[in-house]
Image (tube, helix red, strand yellow):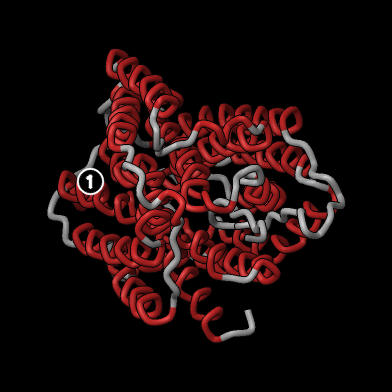
Amino acid sequence: MASATGRWVLLATVLGSGMAMLDGTVVNLALVRMGEDLDVSFAGLQWVVNGYTLSLAALILVGGALGDRFGRKRLFVAGTVWFTAASVLCAIAPSAEVLIAARVLQGIGGALLTPGSLAIIQASFDPEDRAKAIGAWSGLGGVATGVGPFVGGWLVDVATWRSVFLINVPLGAAVVAVAARHVPETKDDTNAGGPLDVPGAVIGAVALAATSYGLTEQEWAILAAGLAMAALFVVIEMRSRAPMLPMGVFRSMQFSGTNVVTFLLYGALAVSMFLLGLVLQQSLGYSPLLAGAATTPITIFMLLLSAQSGALAQRIGPRIPMTVGPIVCAAGLVLLTRVAPGVSYLSGVLPGILVFGAGITITVAPLTTTALGAVDAHLAGIASGVNNAVARTGQLVAIAAVPLLAGFLPGAAVAGTELVDGLHQVLWIAAAVTTASGALAWATIRNPPRAEPAETATQFHCSMVGPPVSAHAE
């Protein structure tokens, strides 16, 4: 941490992961203008979001494995270049179909980029400095993610929705310049000669695509086929000699429980924020800038209290925060059911945002700290990919299920009262799911021993914008 190289590594990884996370927040605020400009249906807007999430979730495990095998810096830089080029394609897209295709390409770049940032930190820093390095990465990355709604809303207001993609060009160039010169190369030599899990990657991607399409269009035969393919994916991974997803990591109840909580929580939050952004602009008349500013209290909570939340979780263990946090989130989602035309921001929106932000702040640090606690350090890339893939899959499935959850007809135009009613229905469902995730955390998460011998202890450190990485001394 005291070296120039260490600071350069932090800068590159923060900018890279922050760019990918920023994209996920700014796009939501541009959806309404995209729909107006390109004549995109509600289902089309779902695919603008899910096209990116689909390829990211399907290939992020591949990205982690490729980084471990061929070099984490190499894949990190390649993913940044790919992501930036795809962002330009999004910005110049002349139609909805081209935009969705470009978003799929953007997700592929994200799948190469995202697992590498934490794996680079884990492999580059001395064991005694990893806590500080990951803490700095978490806080700075959280800032990048938090300012996304405000920046995205401002860009859409003063320029065009296309500008939310063009901001990735200077960011991507900065990441490549810093990483190419200052980031050391690391890889996992233990698995360098094994075969790639091509069948697993293909079947996993097809399963996610079929499941998402089946939910979005309410085509139950396609949905059933997607679920069958998902089951086949599990079988393939269990029998593969070099699986993309080593099923052995799920033998840990701590790891499995945390990832199920991640799936439920991120899915509930994604679907709620997706519809809330549309309702604020279409039904309440907010500009994109005001819609982005409406969620600013969440960012403020994260900036002011995330460090304290992480310290508290280290002191008392993750079980109580991971139980209480989702329940507080659920209370915030229930309060957001007061959002309706004619209701002021102070009385209808702000109370729910404040409570929701408090719940997120309580939850994220222990969730990301605990997720990979049972995974060996040499699986850093794959392990980061697992938790990221789980979170993205939860988001993908939830947004694909919006018509089903909200009671919208597939392909029909949705606006006005119907959109507001759909938001309320989804918020109640999301509140129930987040409450269930808190109960599941209480049932499956155990606090680690308070003291272990220094030579055998494994410490785990929080990541506010991605999955955690084991800081086990190598």
Q: Position of residue 350 (x, y in %)?
A: 63, 52
Q: Is residue 184 above or below residue 266?
A: below
Q: As displayed, is residue 69 above or below residue 269?
A: below
Picture quarter with the C terminus: bottom right
Would residue 341 be visible to someone looking at this image?
no
Residue at 67% across, 60% down: 473
Q: Residue at x 66, y 66 (%)?
A: 127
Q: Amino acid at mark 1?
A: Ile
Task: Pick out the residue farthest to the left.
Answer: 94
> x, y (%) of residue 469?
59, 54
* SS state under label 1: helix
Q: Pick whichever, 390 or 161, lies toward us.
A: 390
- Is 424 on the left-hand or right-hand side of 179? right
**Residue 387: % across, % down:** 52, 43
Most foreground residue, 243 or 353: 243
**Number of marks drawn:** 1
Q: Is residue 410 left or right of residue 38?
A: right
Please name whichever residue, 453 or 61, is drawn nearer the observer in this view of the structure.
453
Q: Quadrant of the N terminus?
A: bottom right
Residue 297 picture quarter: bottom right
Compared across the picture, whether 192 is left or right of 428 comes to: left
Which residue is drawn at the image coordinates 55% and 32% (left, top)? 248
Where residue 61 sits, quadrant-wise, is top left
Q: Position of residue 158 (x, y in %)?
A: 33, 71
User: In front here: 197 or 342?
Assistant: 197
Kindly identify which residue carries mark 1. 100
Task: Answer whether residue 143 is visible to the viewer in this image.
Answer: yes
Crowdedness near tag 1: few (<14), some (14–19) or many (≥20) residues, C-alpha within 10 Å: many
